[in-house]
Image (spheres, rainbow, N blue to C red):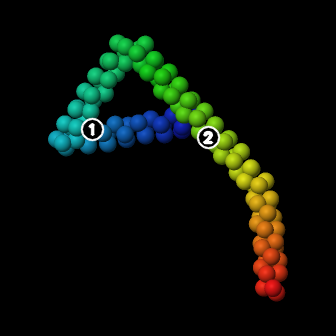
Amino acid sequence: MEKRNKMVEGMLIGALVGAAISLLDKETRTNFIHNGKQVGGKLKYVIQHPQEIADSVRQQIESVKTAVDDVTEDLEYLRTKVNQLKETTPQVLEIVKDTKEVISKHLDTNKGK
């Protein structure tokens, strides 16, 4: 158990040292500060308006549920149509075959006249 704690501790120290070294670059430091301010502003807004955020999340969840329901209905409709096609296709093929035979017999009969 002790080794695991040392490993995690070493990883955290390494990450902090790496972050500190990367902040020596002015552009990285500027980006870090800018992004930190943006995240801080967003966090402040979330803390000050929790109900608005909760309502927004609920609305997005409801929107996703509606979309999933619509897709499910569409898939069920397509499945029904495919099954109908499976049932009617052999019947249509049989009708076409019978019609071809009748026309062939009729043409053969008329050739002899």
10 Å crowding of disc 1: few (<14), some (14-19), many (20+): few
Helix, strand or loop at mark 2? helix
Image point (31%, 27%), residue name: 39
Expressed as whole percent of the image width and height from the top left, the position of residue 60 reads 48, 27
Expressed as whole percent of the image width and height from the top left, the position of residue 15 reads 37, 40
Helix, strand or loop at mark 1? helix
- Tell me the residue that label 1 is attached to: 20
Image point (82%, 77%), residue name: 105
Q: Which numbered tag is attached to residue 74?
A: 2
Q: Which numbered tag is attached to residue 37?
A: none
User: As shown in the figure, which amino acid type bears the numbered disc 1?
Assistant: Ala
In which image quadrant can residue 22 be found?
top left
Image point (22%, 38%), residue name: 31
Number of marks in the rendered image: 2
User: In the picture, which quadrant includes the N terminus?
Assistant: top right
Expressed as whole percent of the image width and height from the top left, the position of residue 46 reads 37, 18
Is any part of residue 2 visible from this angle?
no
56, above or below 98, in the image: above
Image point (81%, 73%), residue name: 101
User: In the picture, which quadrant includes the C terminus?
Assistant: bottom right
Q: Is residue 35 left or right of residue 58?
A: left
The one of 68 and 70 positioned closer to us in this rendering: 70
In which image quadrant can residue 32 be found?
top left
Q: Are marks 2 and 1 in contact (CB under 8 Å)?
A: no
Mark 2 / mark 1, whichever is N-terminal: 1
24, above or below 63, in the image: below
10 Å crowding of disc 2: few (<14), some (14-19), many (20+): few
User: As shown in the figure, which amino acid type bears the numbered disc 2?
Assistant: Asp
- Point out the residue furthest to the left here: 26
Q: In this view, does 13 lie to the left or right of 65?
A: left
The one of 103 and 56 positioned closer to us in this rendering: 103
